[in-house]
């Protein structure tokens, strides 16, 4: 599980970064900042999750290869960061 404001590293192969969340009145605001290498332009992604909702961040795999992905999900008051089971 993840606690509010506690950053977690995200590794999607060539793209890496961090994710954290804050508690807002509308739900839990998840913020992920990702970049390719040390010189890549950072990209920020934000989503507000209600209980039972999830968001998946992924990079495509090559032909015949699985995608590299991380799922951030909320279940009641718990936020989880895990690798989902993806198909090619």
Image (cartoon, rainbow, N blue to C red):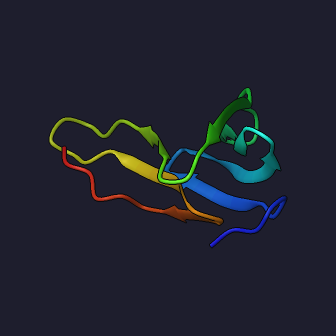
Q: Given the current orientation, which residue lies at the most extreme bottom position?
A: 1
Residue 51 is situated, as x and y percent measured from the top left of the image, at 55, 53
Q: Given the current orientation, which residue lies at the most extreme right position?
A: 5
Q: Is residue 34 above or below residue 80?
A: above
Q: Given the current orientation, which residue lies at the most extreme left position?
A: 64
Q: Is residue 20 above or below residue 2?
A: above
Q: Nearer the viewer, residue 33 or 47?
A: 47
Q: Quadrant of the C terminus?
A: top left
Taking the image as shown, residue 22 lies to the left or right of residue 75, namely right
Residue 14 is situated, as x and y percent measured from the top left of the image, at 53, 44
Taking the image as shown, residue 12 lies to the left or right of residue 19, namely left
Q: Is residue 14 above or below residue 1?
A: above
Residue 18 is situated, as x and y percent measured from the top left of the image, at 71, 52
Q: Residue at x 49, y 47 (%)?
A: 53
- Disc count in the image? 0
Q: Residue at x 22, y 46 (%)?
A: 65
Q: Nearer the viewer, residue 79 or 35?
A: 79
Q: Nearer the viewer, residue 16 or 18?
A: 18
Q: Residue at x 66, y 32 (%)?
A: 45
Q: Quadrant of the N terminus?
A: bottom right
Residue 33 is situated, as x and y percent measured from the top left of the image, at 72, 40
Q: Residue at x 25, y 48 (%)?
A: 66
């Amino acid at each position: 599980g993840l606690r509010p404001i506690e950053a977690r590293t995200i590794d999607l192969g060539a793209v890496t970064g961090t994710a954290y969340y804050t508690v807002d009145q509308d739900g839990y605001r998840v913020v992920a900042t990702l970049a390719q290498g040390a010189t890549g332009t950072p990209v920020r992604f934000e989503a507000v999750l209600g209980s039972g909702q999830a968001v998946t961040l992924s990079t495509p795999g090559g032909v015949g290869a699985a995608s590299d992905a991380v799922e951030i999900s909320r279940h009641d008051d718990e936020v989880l960061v895990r690798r989902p089971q993806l198909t090619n």
